[in-house]
Amino acid sequence: MWKRVLSVSVVLILVVILIVTNFTNIGDEQSEPNIIDVTEDTSVDGVGITAPNVKQLQAGDKAPNFRLPDLSGSEVEAFDVEQDYILLNFWATWCKPCLDEMPDLQTFEHENRDTVKVIAVNTTNTESSIAKVKEFVDEGDFKFTVLLDEDDTVYDHYSIIGMPTSFIIRTSDQKVIKRINGAMSLEQMQDHLNEIQS
């Protein structure tokens, strides 16, 4: 009789172990953070990298001024430009929509050089190295201003929740005219500029 009780007990213990290990998450550790796409507009591609409950800098807000180093190490003040508008773009080399957008940013600045200055802020602390950023910019022969946000200061002040994110800012009063979450085509960039100039 004792053997039968012992056998049933062992079987029950094995069944419980089987259920716990295969059908519950007890003892599992979360292997990676909960990363979600929060670009808001499902018609655009982008990469979510921050919680979506952050209060966002929006059209009508005053854009914070900032100074960051460029790829040569020189400090650049963002609003110290002659153009009426700045197209401020946040990007990273690991963000494919960001990379796809870069040639259009170059063309947009070239075609509107008297009116718009493109400033591309790289989220440098998410990169494997500054050399990788420089290599990408050199290979693309991009001439617009690229700045390095190595400690997320500007990223935080502009409440970025996904990349790419762009702002069209009026230089005279640093007013945000448009916030664009997600990648833009050259045509969309030009449409935004035409709209704010009309």
Image (tube, rainbow, N blue to C red):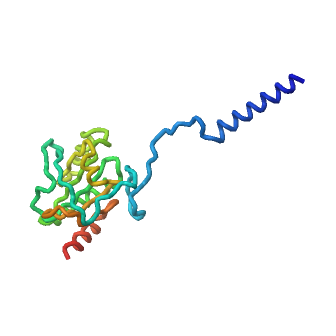
- Looking at the image, residue 131 lies above or below residue 101: above
Residue 3: which quarter of the image?
top right
- Residue at position x 30%, y 64% from top? 185
- Looking at the image, residue 198 lies above or below residue 100: below
Residue 138 visible in rendering: yes
Residue 112, x across and y down, in percent: 16, 66
Toward the right, the furthest residue is: 1
Residue 195: which quarter of the image?
bottom left
- Please indicate whether residue 21 sits to the left or right of residue 128 in the image: right
- Residue at position x 13%, y 51% from top? 77
Residue 110 visible in rendering: no
- Please indicate whether residue 84 sits to the left or right of residue 157 in the image: left
Toward the top, the furthest residue is: 2
Toward the left, the furthest residue is: 82
Residue 198, x across and y down, in percent: 20, 77
Residue 114, x across and y down, in percent: 11, 65
- Residue at position x 41%, y 65% from top? 43
- Please indicate whether residue 55 sits to the left or right of residue 109 in the image: right
Q: Which image quarter is the N terminus in?
A: top right
- Looking at the image, residue 156 lies above or below residue 10: below
